[in-house]
Amino acid sequence: MPRVSHRREFLRNLGLSWAVAPFLWNLPSLGLAAEGSRKQRLIIVFSPNGVVPSTFWPDEEGDKFTLKESLKPLEPFQDRTLILHGVCDKIRGDGDQHMRGIGCLLTGIELFPGNVLGGCSEHPAGWSRGNSIDQEIRNHLQSRPETRTRFGSLEFGVLVQERADTWTRMVYLGPNKPVTPVTDPYRMFSKLYGGLKHRENLASVLDGLKDDLVVVRSQISREDVHLLDEHLTLVRELEQGLQQAVTGGDRHAVPTLPAGIKQQDAQMPELSRMQIDLMVSAFAADFMRVATLQYAYSTGDTVMSWLKIEGRHHDISHLPDTDAQAQAELTRINHWYCEQVAYLAKRLAETPEPGGSGSLLDTTTIVWTNELGKGNDHSHENIPFVLVGGGLGFRTGRSLKFPSVPHNRLLLSLAHGFGHELKHFGNSNYCGDGPLPGLG
């Protein structure tokens, strides 16, 4: 089977529409996929308002540890999990703890002075002074032809408020350049697969490509026909789910928003599932190698009625440790967020690596984190960092405890895992000892 050197040339020679391109780039027999060494992927997942330390952190250190209630959903992936205790956000300066918690979480550098006044600070702040580590890694991958992808990175959100301020943004292209996550799964579907000018009249992306797909099948190997069919099936299932949401279906009430599933607290589980499924689909198509998934925002005040919790998350997180009901509710909330991480890991694990061996989880590292270590004291000590998957080659199946190390060193470790051997990232004062030891 002839190999081709240019994507546009391939489409032009066969008379194919450019719209079919997203379904072709991951097929090895066409020679169109990015060539080179093993693929690597990174997903950063954010949830707000800290954790309950006694129900979150394992007591043990090493490879024999018990997952406590907040982390129990990861039991099927315990051997693929790395829990990092003692990684702390040392960044100080303008803004309150929530603002610096999210604004410095991935950037590792101070916020600019600004006019946004935090609830716990006399010093207003603006945006971050630097780019975030996900964008640093994205730029590194996009600078090399063998790892360049269509989007480079995608930023997903679930119930992230539309207002743009320091509490609501964690991804930065550079100083004073926050990135707004896409919180509407219909908009994300349109971004990935196009052609959805009127979402209330949702049409199939695939139906318009039938003739092109017939031509493609004649040009690819038997193995790639299987890969193409898997991806097309996934897209068709997403279309059917989106169509059902638009028309109401038997699972959801007819929405007031024409887009289908409402952007409201009660439908957070549906929104989460849809965004995760879209993310996995995009990874399978090799649209990007880096993604973020942001739940709510710093000081997120979601009412999680499906967990039989009546209060708002942020309010509950401020109640004292002696309030047993609040501690139990916060544990249930973090257990639910952990369920979302576990579902993401499951979807990656059951999706074969296109053109390679193993699954997407083998080539992906999920990093689940938070802007605070503990909500009621606004601590930046012991920021939750839970890693799942094999993308960066870290030795998983362990609970590690560090002696209050700056989180900049973990950010360096993520970059080094991609072969991007930065000497420092963010505030260089907290990078002196380099990447975290003992991860490999």
Image (cartoon, rainbow, N blue to C red):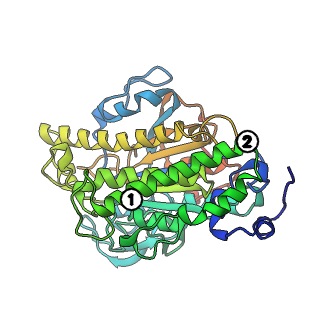
Is residue 298 found left or right of 172 in the rendered image? left
Please, is residue 22 above or below residue 318 in the view? below
Q: In which quarter of the image is residue 288?
A: bottom right
Q: Which of marks 2 and 1 is nearer the N terminus?
A: 2
- Circle 1 residue: 242
Q: Could you tell me which quadrant the C terminus lies in?
A: top right
Mark 1 nearby-residue class (10 Å; few <14, some 14–19, many ≥20): many
Q: Which residue is drawn at 76% across and 45% down?
A: 221
Mark 2 nearby-residue class (10 Å; few <14, some 14–19, many ≥20): few
User: In this rendering, does residue 60 appear at all?
Assistant: yes
Looking at the rendered structure, the secondary structure element under dot 1 is helix
Q: Three-letter amino acid code at disc 1?
A: Leu
Please, is residue 293 above or below residue 128 in the view? above
Is residue 360 found left or right of 356 in the rendered image? left
Towards the viewer: 180 or 283: 283
User: In this rendering, does residue 89 appear at all?
Assistant: no
Q: Three-letter amino acid code at disc 2?
A: Arg
Q: Which residue is drawn at 28% across and 33% down?
A: 54
List x then y, in percent, for residue 370: 38, 50
List x then y, in percent, for residue 311: 14, 52
Q: Residue 387 carries which label?
A: none
- Circle 2 residue: 222
Numbered marks: total: 2
List x then y, in percent, for residue 286: 63, 54
